[in-house]
């Protein structure tokens, strides 16, 4: 039988959830308040918007003076290429590591996980030299390719596939389906949840990245 949650635990959970919601929304409400306020109000003292016309003018000036449209479009292309490549590479790698046994499988998986412990600052110089020697500086390929491999995505997808019944793969093999066809027709449709999870996380990470795009896109 399922253990029932006590009323006190439910109340505490709701209080904590509401508190965390306020913490997450506070930066956005502060941003809106500062944008739609007159210039005489400081950032610290601004808790609520007081001028719609000032907000429209602020947004207009930001769009005209910073030339955000080309930069936003380029960032969207960079993020899209990175995410699509990450989903293809990570899903195929996790599929092989979770559903098939071969020599060195566990060692490869441990090496992939160990790469998560390395901060970017430890390998960014060799990675930049590698990209520069290939002639990929200031190119979309040079930006996206190094960002495609994701140990975290492989880990998340592999953990999901570990709980998937392997009889589905065996049934596909009995029906005569090939290795790639089983992945596309049987496994991939079941991976919607982990793929969506890693897509959201990777989107936030790539969209907010600054050091690598600045380093690569600033040289030729």
Image (spheres, rainbow, N blue to C red):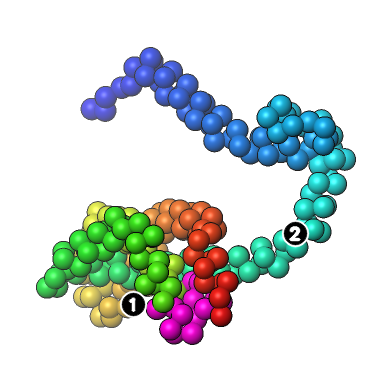
Magenta segment boundaries in residue numbering: 130-144
Is residue 88 visible in this depiction of the protein? no
Badge 1 or badge 2: first in the primary sequence: 2
Query: Dot 2, crowdedness within 10 Å: few (<14), some or many (≥20)?
Result: few
Label 1: which residue?
Answer: 181
- Crowding at label 1, few (<14), some or many (≥20) Cα neighbours within 10 Å? some
Q: Quadrant of residue 140?
A: bottom right
Q: Where does the image place residue 159, in percent across and percent down from the top left?
A: 27, 55
The Cα–Cα distance between marks 1 and 2, rounded to whole angstroms, is 48 Å
Image quarter where the N terminus lies is top left
- Residue 143 drawn in magenta: yes
- The residue lying furthest to the right in this view is 53
Q: Main secondary structure of the magenta part?
A: helix
Residue 33 lies, in percent from the top left, at: 73, 34
Give the structural element (helix, strand or loop) at label 1: helix
In the rendered image, which residue does mark 2 sit on? 66
Q: Nearer the viewer, mark 1 or mark 2?
A: 2
Quadrant in the rendering for residue 139:
bottom right
Determine whether 94 is above or below 10 in the image.
Answer: below
């Amino acid at each position: 039988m399922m253990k029932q949650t006590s009323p006190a635990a439910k109340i505490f959970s709701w209080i904590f959830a509401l508190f965390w919601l306020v913490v997450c929304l506070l930066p956005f409400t502060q941003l809106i308040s500062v944008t739609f306020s007159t210039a005489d109000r400081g950032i610290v003292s601004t808790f609520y918007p007081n001028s719609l016309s000032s907000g429209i003018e602020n947004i207009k000036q930001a769009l005209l003076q910073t030339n955000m449209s080309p930069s936003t479009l380029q960032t969207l292309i960079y993020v899209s290429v990175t995410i699509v490549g990450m989903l293809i590479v990570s899903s195929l790698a996790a599929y092989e590591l979770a559903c098939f046994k071969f020599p060195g499988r566990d060692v490869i998986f441990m090496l992939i996980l160990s790469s998560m412990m390395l901060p970017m600052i430890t390998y960014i110089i060799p990675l930049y030299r590698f990209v520069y020697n290939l002639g990929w500086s200031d190119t979309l390929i040079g930006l996206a390719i190094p960002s495609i491999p994701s140990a975290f995505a492989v880990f998340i997808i592999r953990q999901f596939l570990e709980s998937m019944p392997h009889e589905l793969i065996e049934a596909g093999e009995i029906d005569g389906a090939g290795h790639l066809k089983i992945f596309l027709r049987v496994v991939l449709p079941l991976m919607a949840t982990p793929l969506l999870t890693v897509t959201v996380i990777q989107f936030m990470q790539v969209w907010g990245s600054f050091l690598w795009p600045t380093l690569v896109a600033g040289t030729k």
